[in-house]
Every structure is written in C-alpha cells, then in structure tokens.
Image (tube, grey):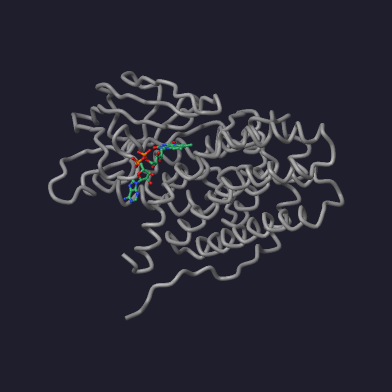
Amino acid sequence: MTIPKLEFPPFRLPPEAEALREQVRIFLEETLPKVKTEDRFASWTTPCPAFSQALGARGWIGITWPKKYGGGEKSFLERYVVTEELLGHSAPAGSHWLADRQSGPLLLRFGSEEQRQAILPRIARGECYFSIGMSEPDSGSDLASVRTRAEPVPGGFRVNGTKIWTSGAHRSHYCVALVRTSGQHGDRHKGLSQLLIDLQTPGISLRPIINLAGRHDWNEVTFTDCFVPETCLIGNEGDGWLQVTSELAYERSGPERFMQNFYVLRELVRVLGRQPSRRAAAILGRLVARLWTLRQMSVSVAGILEAGKSPAIEGALVKDLGTIYQQDLPEVARVLAESDATTEEDLADFLDIAQLSTLMSPTYTIQGGTTQVLRGIVARGLGLR
Ligand SMILES: Cc1cc2nc3c(=O)[nH]c(=O)nc-3n(C[C@H](O)[C@H](O)[C@H](O)COP(=O)(O)OP(=O)(O)OC[C@H]3O[C@@H](n4cnc5c(N)ncnc54)[C@H](O)[C@@H]3O)c2cc1C
C-alpha cells in the first residue's frame, strides 16, 4: 500500500518575482495612505477604493489573468509577492481582496464569456468588489447542508434564504452565493450551484454584524423572492460543490494566513531596541523562525499551484499552522515587551497594539475553515481516517 505523504518541495521565488517586489515597495512608499493602528490587523478586510484603484492602475490586481480580461498574464508567484508586500505594509487592500483572490479566478475558470467580459476588467481596475456567500446560520463547516434555495423559474431563479458572516457584503457589488437548485436525493453534494448576485437586486436585505473589536466586516444577507437571471449562473447547474471546493487551496495557503498581524512582530523588534537581552533575542528568534518556516511552506504551495496542481492538503496545513502562530504572537510579544521594552512610552504603545491584535485573533482559526476541520482534511489526505 502506498502511504500518501505531504509534499513541500523547496522552492525559491524566481528573479522576476523579486524584481517586482522592488517596484511594489516603491509604489507603496509613494501611495500607501496613512493606516490606522486598528486597521493594521485587518489589512485584507480594510476597504479603500482609492488604494485598490491605484493598485489596479499598476496592473497588480488580476495579475495572473489573460490580458483580454484586463489581467497581466504574469505568474502566480508574482501575485504572491504583491500579496506579501501588501500584508507586510498593512495596506488597506480590503476592497478588492476577495475579488482578486477568489471570485475573479472562479469566473475565469467556470464563468460564461459574457460574465468574464463584463466583470473581470472591472475587478482588475480595482473598481468592482465581491463577497462570498457560503455560510448560513446552520451551515458552516458542513457547507453541503446549505438551505438557501434557488428555484428555477422562467428566465432565471427565485432565491430565498439567509447567508451569514458575509464579509464585506455592505461594500461589495456582487456576492457569489452557494445555493441549492435541486433536491438532495441521495448525495447532498449534488444539486448545489453558484450564482453571481448583484447586491442591488430587489429582495436582498443586509444586517450588519459587529465583531469583538467593534468592526463592521460581517453581514447577514437575506434573500426574499429575489429574482436572479439565468445568465448569472456560474458554471453548470449542479456543479456548485465541485466549483466551491476548487477555490479552497487558493483561499487557504496564501500569506494572509500567517501575516495578518505581522505588524506586531515589526513593532516588537522596534520596542526591544537594537541590543535586546539574550533571552529576548532567543524568544524573538523563535517567533521569526516559525514565521520563516510558514513562509517557506506557503511559497512551496505557491510553486505547486503554479505547476498546475491542487495542493489541498498542504494548503490546509499552512492555514492550520499559520493561524495558530498568529494567535500565539500577540500574547508572547506582550509578555516579552512587558519585561524588555526599552522605554515606558514604547511599552504603552505596544500594549495597545497587542490588545487590538488579541481582539482580532479568535477569527483566524475559524475563517476559511476551522482548525478542527482542516486537521480532518489533513488526516484524511494522509490516509489516517
Ligand atoms: C473573520 C471571518 C470571516 C468570515 N467570512 C466569511 C465570508 O465572507 N463568507 C462566508 O460564507 N463565511 C464566512 N465566514 C464563516 C466561516 O466560514 C465559518 O464560521 C466557518 O466555516 C465555521 O462554521 P460555523 O461558524 O458554522 O461553525 P461550525 O461549523 O458550527 O463549527 C463549530 C465548532 O465545531 C467544530 N466542528 C464542526 N465540524 C467538525 C468536524 N467535522 N470535525 C471536527 N470539528 C468540527 C468546528 O471546528 C468548530 O469548533 C467567516 C468567518 C470568520 C471568523
């Protein structure tokens, strides 16, 4: 019997990707708006349409897509570098993030030619924003149990149901909703479809949900007899499960899974001063080593994706380890700063940073698939269950 194994082949970003890094850094130095401290832990959910449009004008949204859809026809590795720099600078990239990472690639792969032409160039210009309508009040990890119904009617579908935790729906133009288009006789993974829904459509109401840190990122989105034209079906009716799961390796393995609170580490280095104690240097060294290991794993996954494979298990592992690191970081850093910060003023500032980061951290191990669910995927992939 062949025992399945994890593959993280060593991988280096190619010179053209590193050359792009320099250009992105210069652009950020010139363009980055002032970022509020509380937004530094939510770079990819902090909206700033003007920043997204400036990035789009440089050709760095939809960077891997064909030129005929407004893309840059560059590699996935160049996209990786742009993403890494945006996170490293806590850039407010929330307006376009989901459209660039997930919904655009979904349309590129499964959307109709009409959908691609109408939407992809607008995303690439940083002008069109998306939200993801997967979870429902009773369906999260068990996504195949979604109950939002899209009943086929002449010319389209009549949608009824509720989505929840829909990040950024209040500032998006569209939602990609996973809906049930036919009954679940036998295999419940069948009969699901994805719809491209214009959030201005009559019959949609949004209720804001405020998180622990006081931010309005989430929404509850309710569809009541909402008519969606048949031209808004993404891919084939009934293929929703296959399509939705194909998004996940991209969603899980990127640097946003271990760099969301990178600012804490940067500030920790600053407050410890140029000559930290041996103990402080050792603790800091461990944090940096963990981060670098995650980064190498994530770059390796990017290399596998670039080669056209789908590293679902490796992606799940990066997210699991990355989000646990992000949850450990603020507390380890706070304790270290309390004993080793060089000035009282630095310490006071740093405690505020650690507090804000701690308030955001419970979300890390839930969004994009919970830790327990990811471990189930890894175990199954290794033939352990
Ligand atoms: C910051 C953030 C942003 C989000 N944005 C979006 C979004 O834009 N769009 C969207 O659709 N959703 C979004 N979500 C929702 C997210 O995908 C769900 O919260 C997540 O999938 C978990 O689902 P749930 O909340 O229903 O928890 P449940 O699935 O009910 O899980 C509850 C607990 O049971 C455990 N559990 C469940 N099943 C298993 C199992 N089989 N084995 C072991 N343990 C299990 C889980 O690990 C968890 O600890 C977001 C969530 C967060 C935190």
**Residue 267 can be seen in this image:** no
Direction from residue 310 to residue 148 in the image, left or right: left
- Which quadrant would residue 54 be assigned to in this image? top right
Task: Give the tally of numbered discs.
Answer: 0
Residue 25: x percent and y percent?
75, 45
Residue 374: x percent and y percent?
41, 54
Instruction: Report the residue at 32% width, 40% height from top.
Output: 194
Which residue is situated farthest in the right direction here?
A: 275
- Which quadrant would residue 158 be assigned to in this image? top left
Which residue is situated farthest in the bottom direction here?
A: 1
Instruction: Report the residue at 47% width, 63% height from top.
Output: 308
Front residue of 223/306: it is 223
- Which quadrant would residue 155 be assigned to in this image? top left
Front residue of 344/112: it is 344
Indicate whether 30 appears above or below 159. Answer: below
Instruction: Report the residue at 53% width, 37% height from top.
Output: 123
Which residue is situated farthest in the front direction here?
A: 339
**Residue 295 can be seen in this image:** yes
Q: Quadrant of the C terminus?
A: bottom left
Q: Quadrant of ligand 1?
A: top left
Residue 261: x percent and y percent?
63, 42
Indicate whether 167 appears above or below 367. Answer: above
Q: Quadrant of the N terminus?
A: bottom left
Direction from residue 146 to residue 251 in the image, left or right: right
Residue 134: x percent and y percent?
36, 38
